[in-house]
């Protein structure tokens, strides 16, 4: 086949059509992805609204006789004859068992064996019904 001006024009027109087609396909694909993203976001918002309307979260109002305990920490110097059980009885809240309280004290103070040495200081949590804002 001879190279003529006519053939080269046809060839460049075909290349241009392929380029335009590829560009149009890419543009169409991008717009399709954008449409799906918008549809997905709209569906998510509608499902959240519908779930809140038909299945509202129930917030339990605090009863009048229910007591709220706030948790604080205190450093205590160990005296001779003190035990973790004594501290648990003195400082724990009624909602916390003695064993759980002792485990927490051991964890806070990184005490593996749970032996108390007179004269040392440990940190113990205590619970109070009064709220104090210690961030000053």
Image (cartoon, grey):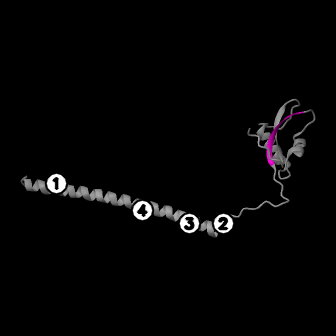
Q: CA distance from mark 4 to mark 1?
A: 34 Å
Q: Earlier in the sequence, mark 2 or mark 4?
A: 4
Q: Between disc 3 and disc 4, whose residue precedes?
A: 4
As drawn, 9 above or below 106: below
Pointers 3 and 2 in contact (CB under 8 A)? no
Marks 4 and 2: in contact by CB < 8 Å? no
- Position of the C terminus by quadrant: top right
Residue at the spot 12% in from the left edge and 55% down from the top edge: 9
Q: Are marks 4 and 1 in contact (CB under 8 Å)?
A: no
| Residue 87: percent from left, percent from top | 88, 41
Instruction: Give the quadrant of the N terminus.
Output: bottom left
Residue at the limit of the structure toward the front, as seen here: 136
Residue hosting label 1: 12
Q: Is residue 54 magenta?
A: no
Question: Callout 3: few (<14), some (14-19), or many (20+) C-alpha neighbours within 10 Å?
Answer: few
Residue plotted at (23% across, 57% down): 18
Q: Are marks 3 and 4 in contact (CB under 8 Å)?
A: no
User: Considering only order in the chain, which callout, 2 or 1, is on the residue closer to the N terminus?
Assistant: 1
Secondary structure under the numbered disc 4 in the rendered image: helix
Q: Which residue is mark 3?
A: 47
Judge left or right: residue 134 versus residue 21: right
Q: Nearer the viewer, residue 117 or 54?
A: 54
Q: Residue at x 85, y 30 (%)?
A: 120
Q: Which residue is mark 4?
A: 35
Q: Mark 3 vs mark 2: which is more N-terminal?
A: 3
Mark before the other along the chain sequence, 3 or 1 = 1
């Amino acid at each position: 086949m001879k190279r003529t001006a006519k053939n080269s024009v046809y060839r460049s027109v075909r290349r241009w059509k392929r380029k335009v087609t590829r560009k149009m396909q890419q543009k169409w694909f991008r717009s399709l992805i954008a449409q799906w993203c918008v549809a997905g976001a709209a569906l998510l918002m509608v499902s959240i609204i519908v779930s809140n309307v038909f299945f509202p979260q129930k917030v339990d109002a605090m009863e009048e006789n229910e007591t709220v305990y706030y948790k604080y920490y205190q450093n205590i110097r160990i005296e001779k004859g003190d035990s973790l059980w004594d501290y648990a009885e003195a400082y724990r809240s009624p909602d916390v068992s003695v064993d759980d309280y002792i485990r927490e004290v051991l964890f806070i103070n990184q005490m593996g064996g749970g032996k108390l040495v007179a004269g040392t200081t440990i940190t113990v949590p205590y619970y109070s019904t009064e709220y104090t804002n210690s961030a000053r």
